[in-house]
Amino acid sequence: MASTTDCHGKVTTVGVRPTKKLTRMGDAALTPAEQSELSFLKRMVNEKQDAAYSHSPASSAKLDLYYARDELKEYVSVLRVKGRNI
């Protein structure tokens, strides 16, 4: 490991790589249960979207899609508050 000093007296280390990945505060992976819930909610949004934009949608299809999207958005928001990396 070599060190140099610049004209302002600042010491710089040359040739050293960080050994640890830098992460943000609270950066955490999803647990298996959270991954499962997130996958389920995404699948529900996809299904409701297909139903809402089909050739002959049910009268409540757009409302169902709205609620599915809202539930997914709320769940993702809660996970981000917990510090989950999504």
Image (tube, rainbow, N blue to C red):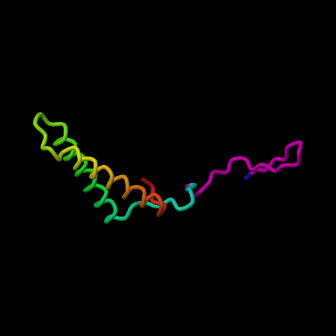
**x 79%, y 50%: residue:** 3
**Residue 18, above or below 59:** below
Q: Position of residue 81 (x, y in %)?
A: 48, 61
Question: With respect to residue 70, does 50 lie above or below?
Answer: above
Q: Is residue 15 magenta?
A: yes
- Residue 84: give x, y in percent of width and height: 45, 59
Residue found at the far left of this picture: 56
Task: Give the farthest residue toward the top.
Answer: 55
**Which of the 4 quarters of the picture holds residue 19?**
bottom right
Q: Is residue 69 left or right of residue 2?
A: left
Helix, strand or loop: magenta stretch? loop
Left or right: 81, with 18 as reference point? left
Image position of 43 with respect to 55: above or below? below
Q: Which residues are magenta?
A: 2-21
Query: What residue sits 23% from the left and 47% below the top?
Result: 63
Q: Residue at (30%, 49%) from the top-left corner?
A: 69
Q: Residue at x 14, y 36 (%)?
A: 54
Pick the front one: 80 or 31? 80
Residue 85 position, x and y percent, is 45, 55
Along the line of sight, the residue nearer the viewer: 42 or 18: 42
Does 9 appear in magenta? yes
Q: Position of residue 65 (x, y in %)?
A: 24, 47
* Marker count (numbered): 0
Question: Would residue 72 appear left or right of 82 to someone viewing this image?
Answer: left
